[in-house]
Amino acid sequence: MKDIVVVTASRYQEQAFWKSTLLGQSLKRIALSGSLRIIPFFENSLGLPVVYNRTLVNENRDVILLFVHDDVYIDDYWLVERLNEASEKFDIIGIAGSSRIVAGQLAWPVLGLDADGKPVWDDAAYLSGRVAHPEKTGAVVSVYGESPKECKQLDGLFIAVDCAKLLDKGIRFDERFDFHCYDLDFSRTCADAGLKVGTWPIAVTHASGGNFGSPEWRNMLQLYRQKWA
């Protein structure tokens, strides 16, 4: 069984990270041990690809790296076992994603906007995963589709990788992206390189719905479309 190394970038200082972030709180609950470690980047202002690439090194060849946002609460305390099970089937593991890529789509589950400017979701047959989101009445689980499922795109809130497979393929995160579209680009790059990309049922709660539609997001979407034209 491989060790799991959690990689996260947070704007918080160390003490505040463990006290205030969902990820910090959940890792204390799960209890870090020899088989579950963390490489945190506190007070971070760099793009996620820059930070994540620093951990794709030979020293981590024999582990599974889990890239996860600091506003994610990992509910599943069988995390080490879940990811080791998943790694027997997939090289790149997420918890939500899509099995197809559609020209002009806005995000992995969104094909475009309707006449009223509302998102047009892709058919559930192509989507995969479940993620809980906090509401005033408690966490509500968003059901996207069946899981496990082989995918071409993954949501970046939670992506685990077999480090050795990436090193052998020479794959890195594209540092031209910052906090948007890097996940779509990365999972697509891995799939094109012949690595198996897919989702696995792991329970998490994500406090953010993303900055869909923001100027920063639009800039990264344009870069993504130019790269994959």
Image (cartoon, rainbow, N blue to C red):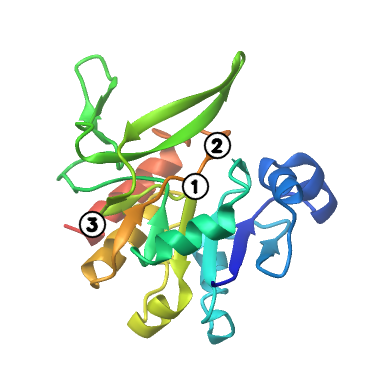
Residue 122 position in % (x across, y down): 21, 32
Q: Are marks 1 and 2 in contact (CB under 8 Å)?
A: yes
Q: Could you tell me which secondary element the residue under label 3 belongs to? A: helix
User: Mark 2: which amino acid?
Assistant: His
| Label 1, residues with CA under 10 Å away: few <14, some 14-19, many ≥20 | many
Q: Are marks 1 and 3 in contact (CB under 8 Å)?
A: no
User: Mark 3: which amino acid?
Assistant: Gln
Tell me which numbered mark, 2 or 3, is placed earlier along the sequence: 2
Is residue 176 in sight in this rendering? no
Residue drawn at x 41%, y 34% as measured from the top left? 212
Q: Could you tell me which secondary element the residue under label 2 belongs to? A: strand
In the image, residue 20 sits, relative to residue 52, either above or below, namely above
| Label 2, residues with CA under 10 Å away: few <14, some 14-19, many ≥20 | many
Mark 1 highlights which residue?
Answer: 157
Residue drawn at x 43%, y 45% as measured from the top left? 201
Q: Which mark is residue 226?
A: 3
Cα–Cα gap, marks 2 and 3: 29 Å
Q: Nearer the viewer, mark 1 or mark 3?
A: 1
Residue 226 position in % (x across, y down): 23, 57
Q: Which mark is residue 206?
A: 2
Cα–Cα gap, marks 1 and 2: 8 Å
Task: Tell me which corner region of the image, top left, top right, bottom left or bottom right, holds residue 36.
Answer: bottom right
- Name the image quarter holding the C terminus: bottom left
